[in-house]
Structures are given as C-alpha cells and as structure tokens.
Image: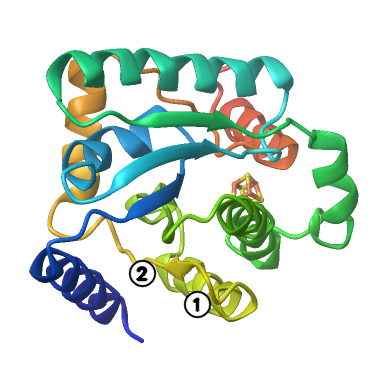
Amino acid sequence: MKNREYYDAYQAEIAAIKEKGQRPSLLLHVCCAVCACDILTYLSEIFDITVYYMNDNIYPKEEYDHRLSELKRYLEWYHKNYANPIHLVEANYDNAGYTEEMQDYLDLPEFSARCWNCYEYRLVRTFQYANEHSFDYVATVMSVSRYKNAARINEIGEKLQKDYPNVKYLITDFKKDQGEQRSNALAKELELYKQPYCGCANSLREYLARKESSGLI
Ligand code: SF4
C-alpha cells in the first residue's frame, strides 16, 4: 500500500465502525504524550481506549519515567476536558531484555532494520496484551511522526494480525491531514515535554554526537 492508501484504509475502517454504531475497545500503544495528545482527543469518541505504555527501548530509565509522567499529566488534562475515560496500562520496563533481543541491529543506523525491529518489538507485546485481555483493536500512535515509517509500522501490524486473529490491527497514518502539526500545537499549548531523541541508547548517542558536531556542547 502507498501512504495515502493507509490513511484511506483508516478512514474506511472508522466509517464502518460508526456505521455499525459500535464502540469497540482499542489498546493504543503510546510512545509519548506529544505523539498521543491530539490523537486521543478524537479517537476516544470512537473507541473505548486503553493506552499501553510499552517502551522498553527508552534509555535511560529516568527518561522512560519522565515520558510516562508527562503522559499521566496529559491524561489529567484530557479528563478535565473530555468526557470519555481513557485507561492507562504501563508494561514492565525491561530495557535489558530489549537490548538483548535487538543485539543484531544495534550497530545499524536510524531508519533501518534497527527501527523496523524496534517497532515490531513493541507491537508484538501490544498484540500479546490485547489478545490476553480480549481487546477488539490494536493501534500505535507512532505513525503520527515524520520520523517514523508509517508503511513499515502498518506492514508489521498487518503481519501480526495474522498471528493474533482475534485482535484487529487498525491501520493508521496519523500524520496525514495536518495530524503531526495538530499534535505539536497541542503539545506546545500544554507545555508537554518534547524529547530531543527518539528513545534508545543509540538514538541518545546519535543526538549527543549531532549536538557536539554542531558545537552546541
Ligand atoms: S531510533 Fe527510535 S525507533 Fe529507531 S531503534 Fe531507536 S528508539 Fe527504536
């Protein structure tokens, strides 16, 4: 599928849900409040949402905790302003397990198999949780970012749906139709923490190297 087709598929699925008058449950993988903030305001009108904070990739633990606390701060704001409740589930943080499983890819650059496997690592665990807890749908907010490859994310989601036939993967490309701009604007308004690097130890090192080469440190 081309990127626009992913967005069309998403819209068709949402239209079908509305047509049936259903309110399915959705386990929504969230990497950070900035990516999730705008999406949750409209997706919560269609789905009964549980946010799944499954991000073993994030290093160090202080950064993981900080992104989680910002997500909680955002959810407090959300619940003061929107009627439909959103639940939050935090997966057990296991950066050592992540690093071990990703061993073969760690030396690769960003936007390569390193990242595709990182998406899959988190989506597999999201599907597992959704399957164990009988969710109707799984999705991830990662497709809102221009730094994430929506086509790869959707290919992985569609592949995993075959392994977990009881859970439907919601194809998305949340960045379309100004989605990323809306997220950034709301995050700015709410003064949400916008992290300077993607998450893993390598992306932190790459960020620091860029900063150093530009003379900022
Ligand atoms: S750069 Fe981001 S997506 Fe890529 S491996 Fe690191 S944390 Fe995962």
Say whether marks 1 and 2 touch (CB < 8 Å). yes
Quarter of the image where the N terminus is located: bottom left
Residue 148 in the image: above or below residue 151: above
Residue 178 in the image: above or below residue 105: above
- The residue type indicated by label 2 comes to Ile
Which of 32 and 136 lies nearest the eye of the viewer?
A: 136
Measuring from the top left, give residue 146's x and y in whole percent.
36, 54
Measuring from the top left, give residue 104's x and y in whole percent.
87, 62
Residue 60 in the image: above or below residue 126: above
Quarter of the image where the C terminus is located: top right
| Mark seen at residue 171 | 2
In the displayed structure, does residue 58 sit left or right of residue 104? left
| Mark seen at residue 120 | none
Q: CA distance from mark 1 to mark 2?
A: 8 Å
| Residue extending furthest toward the bottom | 1
Measuring from the top left, give residue 105's x and y in whole percent.
80, 60
In the displayed structure, does residue 46 sit left or right of residue 33? left
Residue 134 in the image: above or below residue 92: below
- Residue drawn at point x = 39 percent, y = 51 percent: 26
- Residue drawn at point x = 12 percent, y = 62 percent: 21
Neighbourhood count class around disc 2 (C-alpha, 10 Å): few under 14, some 14–19, many 20 upward: many
| Distance from mark 2 CB to nearest ligand 1 atom below 8 Å | no
Quarter of the view holding residue 186: top left
Measuring from the top left, give residue 180's x and y in whole percent.
24, 46
- Residue drawn at point x = 74 percent, y = 35 percent: 201
- The residue type indicated by label 1 comes to Glu
Disc 1 designates what residue? 158
Tag 1 secondary structure? helix
